[in-house]
Image (tube, rainbow, N blue to C red):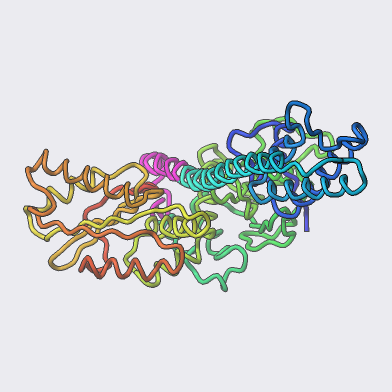
């Protein structure tokens, strides 16, 4: 196994706005045994230093300001109420110890300890509240980062698909839309068939056909290590060189590495040449490296910036699929008509609810299937928010629009319904009751997400088949070619 040395790593647990080495030392985001050890060591050292400086008053009583409580307050702000109370108990034990040896004479200072305890409790409550808020904000930012990365990749795919309609549609055996459909089918396969990288071989065949690769291999990355054995290979076999300049550059920067990339126009003295054409990281979300694609040979005319960028985006598309493959497969198996984008984001938000308790909501609007409701239905589709994911359904007598609202609880869902109803009144002079529009809501569950979604569909009295009206979804409809 080969250790993947990366130049930049995202610090897990780093607070929002935290930056710089010294700031992280002053306000670390650690807890548990580390904080308990720091509590014991720092309090013991502080009281020992007080004894050395003032042997007759080690707790600094009667000096005009309660200096002894500064350290417990700092510990409470950093680690919360529990560590703060622990520091108060150590102060109390220190007073009894010093009193027994005669270093702290006099009666027990009840008001001194009572006031200090209240001050530490207030500081600890402040630390707990803001620690919880920061944890929730980090979870939301991770989710938004993941959505932004997926949106960026699909945005690029949309632009490339239109360009290929004009340039090389006739020369390609398949369209970009077919390529993405095949990639989705690969990631939804049974995980037992693909090991760590689900469906690695059929995925590599699809990518090789779309990007005209002649010899390439895919290697799995687990944590900080890269497997020396290829998970899948296409074309003539070749050896993997971990010291190749393109491989090292890709592992360090987690970006597409080719000879025209920044920093590689001049070869390193130790490795004057490379045997590969390009090396692409398989990134899930914004920064999670799950694989490495090494391309040894491809046609000269295909070695263009656009084709290499398409290769990079397809690998990211595949990585996002396998990251959430288990949850997405379960939803797709139970509800065959559920769109891939809806199932993927529903699985992400269920995990977010389970990890952090942040709510998301599905709002379902049910319309009668007649011509008078067509304009209402289409207007509601056009009025969705940018972050929402829409899923239109139809049956013999009714149709519905399921809107998945990320990071939105009951209040946000109610505001959304009020906005839609006001819009219908302004444009059509009607409301939900007059237009006989059924309204149903579902809070995205933290566990067993499939059953509540099926029950919501039953309440809407619609089949699980997508409606014929095309609608852009939050992750982008790509590959119209």
Task: Identify the residue shown where x is 13% and y is 44%.
Answer: 424
Q: How many marks?
A: 0
- Whether residue 378 sits left or right of residue 265 in the image: it is left
Q: Pick out the residue farthest to the top.
A: 64
Q: Residue at x 25, y 70 (%)?
A: 458
Q: Position of residue 289 (x, y in %)?
A: 63, 51
Q: Residue 124 in the image: x percent, y percent?
A: 62, 44
Residue 190 percent location from the top left of the image: 51, 72
Q: Quadrant of residue 43?
A: top right
Relative depth, front residue between 213 and 345: 345
Q: Is residue 391 above or below residue 80?
A: below
**Is any atom of residue 325 visible in this view?**
yes
Q: Toward the viewer: 251 or 110?
A: 110
Relative to residue 465, is residue 378 drawn left or right? left
User: Is the stretch drawn in magenta largely helix, strand or loop?
Assistant: helix
Of 211 and 182, nearer the camera is: 182
Q: Closer to the camera, 105 or 407?
A: 105
Q: Which residues are magenta?
A: 151-177
Q: Is residue 165 magenta?
A: yes
Image location of residue 294, percent across then percent down: 66, 51
Residue 270 to residue 394: above or below: above
**Per the image, is 405 magenta?**
no
């Amino acid at each position: 196994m080969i250790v993947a040395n990366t130049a930049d790593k995202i610090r897990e647990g780093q607070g929002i706005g935290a930056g710089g080495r010294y700031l992280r030392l002053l306000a670390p985001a650690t807890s548990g045994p580390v904080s308990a050890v720091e509590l014991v060591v720092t309090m013991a050292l502080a009281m020992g230093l007080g004894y050395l400086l003032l042997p007759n008053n080690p707790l600094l009583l009667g000096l005009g300001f309660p200096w002894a409580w500064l350290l417990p307050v700092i510990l409470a702000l950093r680690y919360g109420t529990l560590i703060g109370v622990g520091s108060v108990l150590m102060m109390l034990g220190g007073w009894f110890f010093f009193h027994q040896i005669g270093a702290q004479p006099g009666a027990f200072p009840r008001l001194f300890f009572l006031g200090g305890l209240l001050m530490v409790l207030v500081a600890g409550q402040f630390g707990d509240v803001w620690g919880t808020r920061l944890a929730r904000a980090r979870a939301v930012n991770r989710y938004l980062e993941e959505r932004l990365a997926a949106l960026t990749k699909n945005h690029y795919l949309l632009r490339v698909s239109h360009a290929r309609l004009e340039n090389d549609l006739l020369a390609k055996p398949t369209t970009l839309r077919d390529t993405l459909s095949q990639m989705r089918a690969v990631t939804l396969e049974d995980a037992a068939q693909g090991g760590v990288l689900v469906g690695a071989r059929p995925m590599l065949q699809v990518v090789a056909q779309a990007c005209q690769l002649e010899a390439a291999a895919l290697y799995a990355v687990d944590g900080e290590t890269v497997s020396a054995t290829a998970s899948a290979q296409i074309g003539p076999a070749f050896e993997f060189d971990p010291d190749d300049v393109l491989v090292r550059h890709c592992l360090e920067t987690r970006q597409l590495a080719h000879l025209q990339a920044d920093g590689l126009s001049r070869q390193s003295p130790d490795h004057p040449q490379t045997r590969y054409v390009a090396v692409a990281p398989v990134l899930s979300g914004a920064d999670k490296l799950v694989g490495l694609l090494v391309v040894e040979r491809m046609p000269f005319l295909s070695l263009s910036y656009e084709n290499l960028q398409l290769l990079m985006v397809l690998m990211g598309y595949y990585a996002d699929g396998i990251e959430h493959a288990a949850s997405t497969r379960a939803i797709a198996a139970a509800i065959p008509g559920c769109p891939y984008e809806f199932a993927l984001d529903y699985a992400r938000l269920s995990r977010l609810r389970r990890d952090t308790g942040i709510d998301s909501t599905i709002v379902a609007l049910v319309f009668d299937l007649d011509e008078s409701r067509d304009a209402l239905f289409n207007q509601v589709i056009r009025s969705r928010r940018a972050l929402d994911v829409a899923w239109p359904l139809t049956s013999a007598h009714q149709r519905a629009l399921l809107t998945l609202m990320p990071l939105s609880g009951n209040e946000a869902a109610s505001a959304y319904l009020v906005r839609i109803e006001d819009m219908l009144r302004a444009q059509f002079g009607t409301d939900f009751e007059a237009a006989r529009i059924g309204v149903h809501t579902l809070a995205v569950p933290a566990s067993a997400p499939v059953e509540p979604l099926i029950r919501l569909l039953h309440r809407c009295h619609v089949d699980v088949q997508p409606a014929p009206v095309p609608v852009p979804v939050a992750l982008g409809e790509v590959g119209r070619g």
